[in-house]
């Protein structure tokens, strides 16, 4: 189970690096299932520490943080684009209304 956990962890890292976010939920659920089965197993915990799972988990945390920042920036750009488009449309609508006024 330790090797399976490590394999899934490495798959999560690969998915994060290659922006395949749609696979993350399944991978995290698989990891969680393994942890649930082994939560009372002290040998499992020691084996995880020995094979360097802590460093891999830190890598996952860093990659998730980078993806969150990237997503926030994309949302801000989209929001700014929407505001700009709405301002442009409102400005043009006001100009059009001036020409439609009766003389």
Image (cartoon, rainbow, N blue to C red):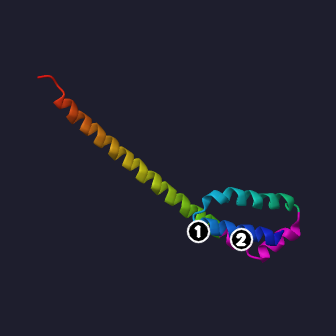
Q: Is residue 91 magenta?
A: no
Q: Which residues are magenta?
A: 41-58
Q: Is residue 29 above or below residue 47?
A: above
Residue under label 2 = 54
Residue drawn where x is 65% and y is 68% of the image:
13
Residue drawn where x is 42% and y is 50% of the image:
78
Q: Is residue 42 magenta?
A: yes
The picture quadrant where one finds residue 65 is: bottom right
Residue under label 1 = 17
Question: Which disc number belongs to residue 3?
Answer: none
Asked whether, in this view, residue 95 is left or right of residue 41, the answer is: left
Task: Tell me the chief SS of the magenta region.
Answer: helix
The Cα–Cα distance between marks 1 and 2, rounded to whole angstroms, is 18 Å
| Quadrant in which the C terminus is drawn | top left
The picture quadrant where one finds residue 87 is: top left
| Quadrant in which the N terminus is drawn | bottom right
């Amino acid at each position: 189970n330790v090797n399976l956990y490590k394999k899934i962890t490495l798959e999560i890292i690969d998915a994060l690096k290659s922006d395949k976010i749609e696979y993350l939920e399944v991978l995290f659920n698989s990891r969680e299932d393994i942890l649930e089965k082994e939560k009372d197993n002290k040998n499992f915990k020691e084996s995880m520490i020995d094979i360097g799972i802590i460093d891999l988990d830190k890598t996952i945390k860093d990659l998730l943080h980078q993806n969150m920042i990237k997503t926030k920036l994309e949302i801000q750009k989209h929001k700014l684009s929407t505001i700009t488009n709405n301002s442009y449309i409102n400005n043009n609508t006001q100009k059009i209304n001036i020409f439609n006024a009766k003389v």
